[in-house]
Amino acid sequence: MMRSDLPASNPDRTALLRIHPDDDVATALRAVDAGDLIEVDGEVLRARQAIPFGHKLALRPLSVGEEVRKYGGPIGRMTARAEPGDHVHQHNLSTQLDDVEVYDYRPGVPNHLPARQMTFAGYRRGDGRVGTRNEIWILPTVGCVARTAERIAAIAQARHAGAIDGIHAFSHPFGCSQLGDDLAGMRSILAALASHPNAGGVLLLGLGCESNQLDALMNEIAPEARQRVRSVLAQSSGDEIAEGLAAIDALVANAALTSRTEVPIGELVVGLKCGGSDGFSGLTANPLVGRIADWVNGSGGSTILSEIPEAFGAERQLMQRARDRSVFEGIVALVNDFKRYFLDHGQPVSENPSPGNIAGGITTLEEKSLGAVQKSGAAQVSDVLRYGQRVRRQGLTLLEAPGNDAISSTAMAAAGATVILFTTGRGTPLGTVVPTLKIASNSPLAQRKPGWIDFDAGEVLHSGLEQGSEALFAKLLAVASGERTASELSGEREMAIWKRGVTL
């Protein structure tokens, strides 16, 4: 209905989007000026202040202490009154998140996921898994030889250009002066990467005196992958560069014997990631990725959702989708353990969103989380993994890792992701261990940063989710079949390890 105190002339019907019928706020699809007449769901409002692109506007009177809903769920409580047409953001809305919680097991009805009879061209490995790349990876056991690894990779890449998909060193600063679980977690990540199907061969480069001893690392590598692994210990070598290059020569010769073959999409393992979210991430890019995740899972493939702190406030949605009580209890433990991790370090569990998120229109962690979990689609949560573990079941897996882009992406790659769908509203040049397809939540970002962005999800606002889903799925299959992403073309490839323990 139109409010009787407002003129009816020419209200803008395209400026606002209310996501769910129960929502108390709408999102600005353009910058709204103070005084603008705007219509949403048949009601005309006058903007009482300027509302930046991607930010929220109150649709009804909101009192102090009142819970506010977006995406159909609570995103916080009002700290100051807002009238219809007011800007709703940090000045008048605050998180409700506080501490660890007790959860009840209330399983929902499993959703039917559609299957797609489509294929991509991948590399079938001896263990049956399928990679999307045929590369040689150099993994240093310790930061002391990280630059040496990079030098070997540069020489080897020039020597073997075109023979395989690439030769890359993934350096890090760790491996020395680490103890206990911290060292074990780091070793598990490296061992999992050394077993990855995107690596046609792996060179482990050690120093010799580090905590992360080469023999212990080798013992954690899957037996079926060890034939693709070589090692060099720098302190025991007369010329570690020459020895490393000789090892890579042999690895390249073996990897070059493998060719791409057509395989069903059920062989995909897709990481689901968002970084630098904005007010549009939950409207465009994340729902789009959720649709792709459902197609992959429905076709027998696997997806991985991580960034556990960015599920706080939306965790009950995931718990209702647990395949059984054991998985439910695993989700509860993962969420509450992460909350205790923050609290034990004297930090609030709601220490998020980031400055970039806030500038993009996200006010509270609940709002960010409700938008973020849409990347997982509607699949049951089939398994819960701790940091450094590898995918064990088909379907959606929840993986322990923080929200940090490089750390969570590396953890998903180590768990088995052969490609990552990475949504972003602010943009980042980051490239990770596996092909990382960057999806802009808004068209201005895609137009401004074509060297960073692979896909413009902002078009969903005009063309619809169905058309956007088909286009993104085609892009995913092209990347899985060898088309290089923007970050691959620009040479942005890196890994990061989660450092949690003391340093000697």
Image (cartoon, helix red, strand yellow):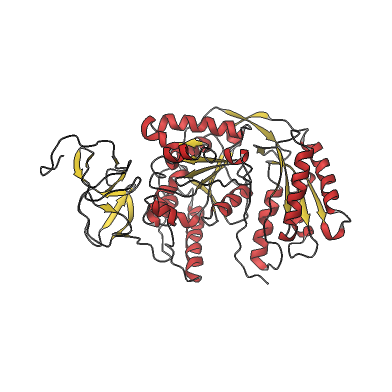
Report which quarter residue 363 is drawn in.
bottom left
Does 238 sit left or right of 111 as displayed? right
Q: How many marks?
A: 0
Against 38, residue 306 (above or below) is below
Which one is nearer the viewer's eye here, 185 or 102?
A: 185
Quadrant in the picture for the C terminus: bottom right
Quadrant in the picture for the N terminus: top left
User: Seen from this angle, which residue lies furthest right?
Assistant: 238
Residue 410 % position (x, y): 61, 51
Let me know if residue 249 appears in the view. yes
Does 218 sit left or right of 442 as displayed? right
Against 465, residue 54 (above or below) is below
Q: What residue appears at the point 64 percent right and 43 percent down from the top-left corner?
A: 491
Q: What residue appears at the point 43 percent right and 29 percent down from the top-left corner?
A: 467
Q: What residue appears at the point 51 percent right and 37 percent down from the top-left corner?
A: 450
Q: What residue appears at the point 76 percent right and 39 percent down from the top-left corner?
A: 158
Which one is nearer the viewer's eye here, 338 or 137?
A: 137
Residue 104 % position (x, y): 40, 58
Does 474 sit left or right of 146 as displayed? left
Residue 390 % position (x, y): 63, 50
Residue 20 % position (x, y): 30, 43
